Amino acid sequence: MSALRAALQDLSEDVFFDLLESEDAYLLVLDVPGVSADSLEVAVDDGRLSIEAHREKDPAGDYQYLEENRSLFLDIELPLPADAVGTETEAVVERGVLELTLPKTAATSETTIDVVEEDA
Protein backbone atom coordinates (compact mmCIF):
# COMPACT_ATOMS: atom_id res chain seq x y z
CA MET A 1 0.00 0.00 0.00
CA SER A 2 2.94 2.35 0.41
CA ALA A 3 3.13 2.88 -3.38
CA LEU A 4 -0.48 4.12 -3.35
CA ARG A 5 0.19 6.43 -0.40
CA ALA A 6 3.29 7.83 -2.11
CA ALA A 7 1.39 8.42 -5.36
CA LEU A 8 -1.40 10.21 -3.51
CA GLN A 9 1.13 12.44 -1.71
CA ASP A 10 2.57 13.41 -5.12
CA LEU A 11 -0.79 14.74 -6.36
CA SER A 12 -1.35 18.47 -6.70
CA GLU A 13 -2.21 20.23 -3.47
CA ASP A 14 -5.53 21.12 -5.13
CA VAL A 15 -6.62 17.46 -4.93
CA PHE A 16 -8.23 16.68 -1.59
CA PHE A 17 -8.43 13.04 -0.57
CA ASP A 18 -8.65 10.63 2.35
CA LEU A 19 -7.33 7.07 2.31
CA LEU A 20 -8.81 4.65 4.82
CA GLU A 21 -8.24 0.96 5.48
CA SER A 22 -10.23 -1.80 7.15
CA GLU A 23 -9.55 -5.50 7.41
CA ASP A 24 -11.57 -6.09 4.23
CA ALA A 25 -10.95 -3.09 1.99
CA TYR A 26 -9.34 0.25 1.25
CA LEU A 27 -11.52 3.34 0.87
CA LEU A 28 -10.27 6.23 -1.24
CA VAL A 29 -12.35 9.41 -0.92
CA LEU A 30 -11.72 12.24 -3.39
CA ASP A 31 -13.34 15.66 -3.57
CA VAL A 32 -14.60 16.25 -7.11
CA PRO A 33 -16.93 19.26 -6.78
CA GLY A 34 -19.49 19.61 -9.55
CA VAL A 35 -18.71 16.21 -11.06
CA SER A 36 -21.46 13.72 -11.82
CA ALA A 37 -21.33 10.05 -12.76
CA ASP A 38 -21.70 11.11 -16.40
CA SER A 39 -18.55 13.23 -16.32
CA LEU A 40 -16.45 10.70 -14.42
CA GLU A 41 -14.50 7.70 -15.67
CA VAL A 42 -12.85 5.19 -13.36
CA ALA A 43 -10.93 2.18 -14.67
CA VAL A 44 -8.62 -0.51 -13.37
CA ASP A 45 -6.04 -1.97 -15.71
CA ASP A 46 -2.83 -3.87 -15.10
CA GLY A 47 -2.64 -3.06 -11.39
CA ARG A 48 -3.34 0.64 -11.88
CA LEU A 49 -6.38 2.74 -11.02
CA SER A 50 -7.15 5.63 -13.37
CA ILE A 51 -9.59 8.41 -12.58
CA GLU A 52 -10.69 11.04 -15.06
CA ALA A 53 -13.21 13.67 -13.99
CA HIS A 54 -14.34 17.01 -15.33
CA ARG A 55 -16.88 19.53 -14.22
CA GLU A 56 -19.31 20.75 -16.82
CA LYS A 57 -20.77 24.16 -16.23
CA ASP A 58 -22.56 26.68 -18.36
CA PRO A 59 -22.55 30.40 -17.67
CA ALA A 60 -25.86 31.76 -16.43
CA GLY A 61 -28.09 33.80 -18.70
CA ASP A 62 -26.29 36.07 -21.16
CA TYR A 63 -22.95 35.83 -19.36
CA GLN A 64 -19.78 34.53 -20.91
CA TYR A 65 -16.47 33.69 -19.29
CA LEU A 66 -13.78 36.36 -19.22
CA GLU A 67 -11.64 34.27 -16.92
CA GLU A 68 -12.26 30.81 -15.51
CA ASN A 69 -10.47 29.84 -12.30
CA ARG A 70 -12.88 27.21 -11.03
CA SER A 71 -12.55 24.62 -13.76
CA LEU A 72 -11.97 21.05 -12.71
CA PHE A 73 -10.22 18.45 -14.75
CA LEU A 74 -8.70 15.56 -12.88
CA ASP A 75 -6.69 12.90 -14.67
CA ILE A 76 -4.72 10.67 -12.32
CA GLU A 77 -3.31 7.19 -12.37
CA LEU A 78 -2.52 5.39 -9.13
CA PRO A 79 -0.97 2.01 -8.30
CA LEU A 80 -3.29 -0.46 -6.62
CA PRO A 81 -2.15 -2.00 -3.35
CA ALA A 82 -0.82 -5.52 -3.89
CA ASP A 83 -3.63 -7.04 -1.84
CA ALA A 84 -6.45 -5.11 -3.55
CA VAL A 85 -8.88 -6.82 -5.92
CA GLY A 86 -9.11 -4.20 -8.66
CA THR A 87 -11.80 -6.00 -10.63
CA GLU A 88 -14.18 -5.68 -7.68
CA THR A 89 -13.66 -1.95 -7.14
CA GLU A 90 -16.85 -0.01 -6.43
CA ALA A 91 -17.27 3.69 -7.21
CA VAL A 92 -19.96 6.04 -5.90
CA VAL A 93 -20.14 9.79 -6.47
CA GLU A 94 -22.51 11.89 -4.41
CA ARG A 95 -22.60 15.67 -4.00
CA GLY A 96 -19.06 16.12 -5.33
CA VAL A 97 -17.45 13.32 -3.33
CA LEU A 98 -16.11 10.20 -5.03
CA GLU A 99 -15.74 7.08 -2.88
CA LEU A 100 -13.78 4.16 -4.26
CA THR A 101 -13.91 0.91 -2.33
CA LEU A 102 -11.04 -1.45 -3.14
CA PRO A 103 -11.70 -4.86 -1.60
CA LYS A 104 -8.75 -6.83 -0.32
CA THR A 105 -7.99 -10.39 -1.29
CA ALA A 106 -9.23 -12.91 1.24
CA ALA A 107 -6.60 -13.62 3.81
CA THR A 108 -5.40 -17.15 3.59
CA SER A 109 -5.93 -19.05 6.77
CA GLU A 110 -3.01 -20.81 8.33
CA THR A 111 -2.68 -24.47 7.49
CA THR A 112 -1.14 -26.82 9.97
CA ILE A 113 0.90 -29.61 8.43
CA ASP A 114 1.21 -32.86 10.31
CA VAL A 115 4.79 -34.01 10.67
CA VAL A 116 5.32 -37.71 10.90
CA GLU A 117 8.41 -39.50 12.04
CA GLU A 118 9.77 -42.02 9.61
CA ASP A 119 11.14 -45.31 10.82
CA ALA A 120 14.81 -45.62 9.98
Image (cartoon, grey):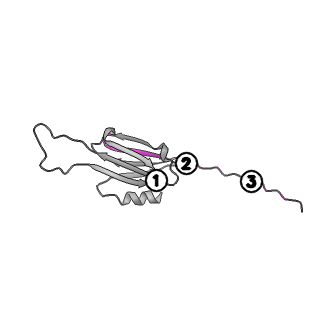
Residue designated by label 2: 105
| Tags 2 and 3 touching, CB below 8 Å | no
| Label 3 SS | loop
Q: CA distance from mark 2 to mark 3?
A: 23 Å
Asked if residue 106 is among those painted magenta in the image, a careful observer would answer yes
Residue at the image point whose x is 38% and y is 57% from the top? 8
Query: Which one is nearer the viewer's eye here, 57 or 92?
Result: 57
Q: Residue at x 35, y 41 (%)?
A: 93
Sort mark 3 into few (<14), some (14-19) or many (20+) by Cα contacts within 10 Å: few
Whichever of callouts 2 and 3 sits on the residue coming sooner in the sequence is: 2
Residue 120 lies left or right of residue 105; in this view the side is right
The secondary structure making up most of the magenta span is loop
Across and down, in percent, residue 59 comes to 16, 41
Q: Amino acid at mark 3?
A: Ile
Q: Which numbered tag is attached to residue 113? A: 3
Left or right of residue 83: residue 49: left
Query: As shown in the figure, which amino acid type bears the numbered disc 2?
Result: Thr
> Residue 57 at x, y = what percent?
21, 41
Q: What's the CA distance linking mark 2 and mark 1?
A: 12 Å
Specify the segment rendered in magenta: 94-119
Taking the view exactly as shown, the residue that stands out farthest to the right is 120
**SS label for mark 2:** loop
Bin the neighbour count of mark 1 within 10 Å (Cα to Cα): few under 14, some 14-19, many 20 and up. many
Name the secondary structure under disc 1.
loop
